[in-house]
Image (tube, grey):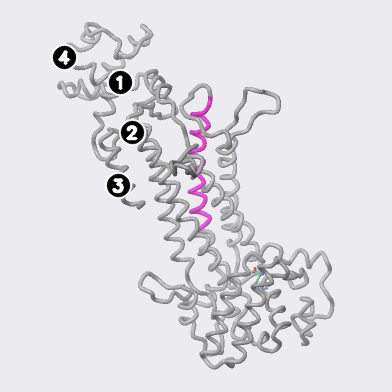
């Protein structure tokens, strides 16, 4: 086929085709307008393949030099925005290869020796996703640092802890924030794990069965950094599997979904805490919007959108996993549909993490270097709220147990005390000693220490508990871990 014929994909296959594609079918089957995003990975993969072909004596050194020079030219054209992407050439791979052949002639046509678009695209998606995971992991670190910084300033701030959204027991606000640090640290671990399985080389699987050329797949893997912690090359060991499975993309989207679910839970709490009924925290105005009709409003748009976008990412997970279901081995065109959900998952997650890093922790003031504009905390409102729901009732039960009562009896005794407090419209700590002693004679005036919010907090001094000493130890552990 002549170089010019490669401009038309319908003519790029072979003489076998007797009629051209309709415009509708062309548009339906093309992916170039979204998969051109893979161009860098595509060129990197092609260069590694070409270098190996030359090293194995499958193509000549002059061909390799031409391919390298042509790819350098294509790189600058794409970066400058002057590269002409053609729908007729279907996808990023055919577009780049056609331009290469236009630029360097036969050497360009030799690049595809021992390769298929099937192993090419699987390699490109893996390379691209790996580089995105390498951006996401540090963002998860930054978000954890931002939360730890806010926690550090609020170890002694007491808020009501909830179960069933009913006031349960007092907790340190820092302790509450550190719960999210745990979640995001597991999200980061999951990303590291997904990266390991993403970072394996399909190239060399060719269309599905492997290739007749003496390829050195491990050399390509090393060149592309597809190696494990010990530097051993990571190569997909079965050609059928290498070209066809997208489980790494599904796993990534599952990890991203979990991370978004954590962000969504945090968002829900921010939205509640910012409402007039709670008044626990404020976020900077630039993350909120007003109302077109109600002048008093400041709506928490960013947390609300993050909660909403979580549905979108979980939807992508459903899309990808359903895409895989029912595909016979090996490659099927269905897999072209992996890209848009994957791209959108990456974009949504990265943007959400970036915005949360700033919304939680603020931005450094250029003059002082100190961070400003993060979450602000209304400690008084939190403490007032903690006083409302008999949050220290469990402490009274524990007090009675220490006096010798079985826990179930203590539980029942305290229920009577709470009922009395409800009747008198006061807190447990406001019931006179004589009234408390009416419920159990062993109650003494030291009970008031355990009925106070601070006493309750301090008493939970076991690993993972909310006592300030424990919370400070956790902050130190996170600080050391996060560097
Ligand atoms: N654009 C295709 C994709 O994204 C490339 C692979 C096409 N392979 C094929 N045999 N049609 O999956």
The total number of labels drawn is 4
User: Residue 238's spot in the image, x, y percent?
Assistant: 49, 77
Name the residue beneath numbered marker 1.
393
**Residue at the image position 42 percent from the left and 25 percent from the top:** 166
Gap in Å between the C-alphas at discs 3 and 2?
15 Å
Gap in Å between the C-alphas at discs 1 and 2?
22 Å
- SS class, disc 4: loop
Gap in Å between the C-alphas at discs 1 and 3?
31 Å
User: Looking at the rendered structure, which numbered label has been put on residue 477?
Assistant: 3
Q: Residues within 10 Å of mark 3 (few under 14, many from 20)?
A: few
Gap in Å between the C-alphas at discs 4 and 1?
16 Å
Badge nearest the viewer, 1 or 3 = 3
Compare marks 1 and 2 and give the one earlier in the sequence. 2
Name the residue beneath numbered marker 4.
442
- SS class, disc 1: helix
Compare marks 3 and 4 and give the one earlier in the sequence. 4
User: Range of the magenta residues?
Assistant: 252-275
Q: Residues within 10 Å of mark 2 (few under 14, many from 20)?
A: many
Compare marks 1 and 3 and give the one earlier in the sequence. 1
Query: 165 or 77: which is nearer to us?
Result: 77
Residue 457 position by quadrant:
top left
User: Looking at the rendered structure, which numbered label has been put on residue 279?
Assistant: none
Q: Is residue 327 left or right of residue 413?
A: right
Compare marks 3 and 2 and give the one earlier in the sequence. 2
- SS class, disc 3: helix
**Residue at the image position 46 percent from the left and 73 percent from the top:** 225
Gap in Å between the C-alphas at discs 3 and 4?
41 Å
């Amino acid at each position: 086929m002549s170089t010019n014929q490669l401009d038309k994909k319908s003519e790029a296959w072979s003489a076998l085709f007797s009629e051209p594609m309709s415009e509708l079918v062309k548009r339906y089957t093309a992916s170039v307008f979204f998969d051109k995003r893979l161009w860098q990975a595509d060129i990197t993969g092609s260069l590694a393949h070409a270098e190996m072909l030359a090293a194995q004596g499958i193509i000549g050194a002059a061909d390799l030099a031409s391919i390298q020079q042509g790819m350098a030219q294509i790189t600058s054209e794409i970066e400058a925005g002057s590269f002409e992407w053609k729908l007729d050439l279907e996808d990023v791979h055919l577009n780049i290869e056609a331009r290469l052949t236009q630029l360097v002639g036969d050497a360009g046509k030799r690049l595809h020796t021992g390769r298929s678009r099937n192993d090419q695209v699987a390699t490109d998606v893996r390379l691209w996703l790996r580089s995105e995971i390498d951006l996401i992991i540090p963002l998860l670190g930054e978000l954890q640092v931002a939360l730890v910084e806010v926690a550090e300033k609020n170890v002694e701030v007491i808020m009501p802890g909830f179960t069933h959204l009913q006031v349960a027991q007092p907790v340190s606000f820092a302790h509450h924030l550190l719960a999210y640090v745990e979640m995001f640290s597991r999200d980061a671990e999951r990303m590291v794990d997904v990266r390991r399985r993403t970072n394996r080389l399909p190239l060399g699987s060719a269309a599905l069965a492997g290739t007749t050329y003496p390829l050195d797949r491990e050399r390509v893997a090393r060149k592309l950094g597809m190696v494990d912690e010990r530097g051993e090359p990571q190569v997909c060991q079965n050609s059928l599997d290498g070209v066809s499975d997208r489980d790494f993309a599904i796993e990534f989207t599952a990890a991203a979904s979990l991370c978004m679910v954590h962000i969504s839970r945090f968002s829900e709490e921010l939205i509640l805490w910012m409402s007039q009924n709670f008044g626990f925290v404020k976020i900077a105005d630039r993350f909120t919007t007003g109302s077109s009709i109600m002048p008093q409003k400041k709506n928490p748009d960013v947390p609300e959108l993050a909660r909403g976008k979580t549905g979108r990412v979980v939807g992508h997970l459903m899309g990808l996993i359903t895409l895989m279901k029912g595909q016979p081995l090996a490659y099927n065109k269905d897999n072209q549909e992996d890209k848009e959900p994957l791209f959108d998952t990456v974009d949504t997650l990265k943007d959400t993490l970036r915005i949360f890093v700033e919304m939680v922790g603020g931005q450094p003031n250029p003059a002082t270097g100190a961070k400003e504009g993060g979450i602000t905390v209304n400690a008084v409102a939190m403490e007032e709220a903690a006083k409302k729901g008999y949050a220290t009732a469990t402490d009274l039960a524990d007090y009675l147990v220490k006096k010798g009562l079985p826990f179930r009896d203590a539980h029942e005794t305290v229920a009577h005390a709470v009922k009395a407090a409800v009747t008198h419209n006061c807190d447990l700590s406001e019931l006179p000693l004589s009234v408390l002693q009416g419920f159990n004679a062993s109650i003494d005036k030291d009970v008031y220490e355990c009925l106070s919010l601070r006493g309750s907090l301090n008493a939970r001094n076991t690993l993972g508990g909310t006592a300030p000493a424990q919370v400070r130890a956790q902050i130190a552990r996170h600080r050391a871990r996060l560097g």
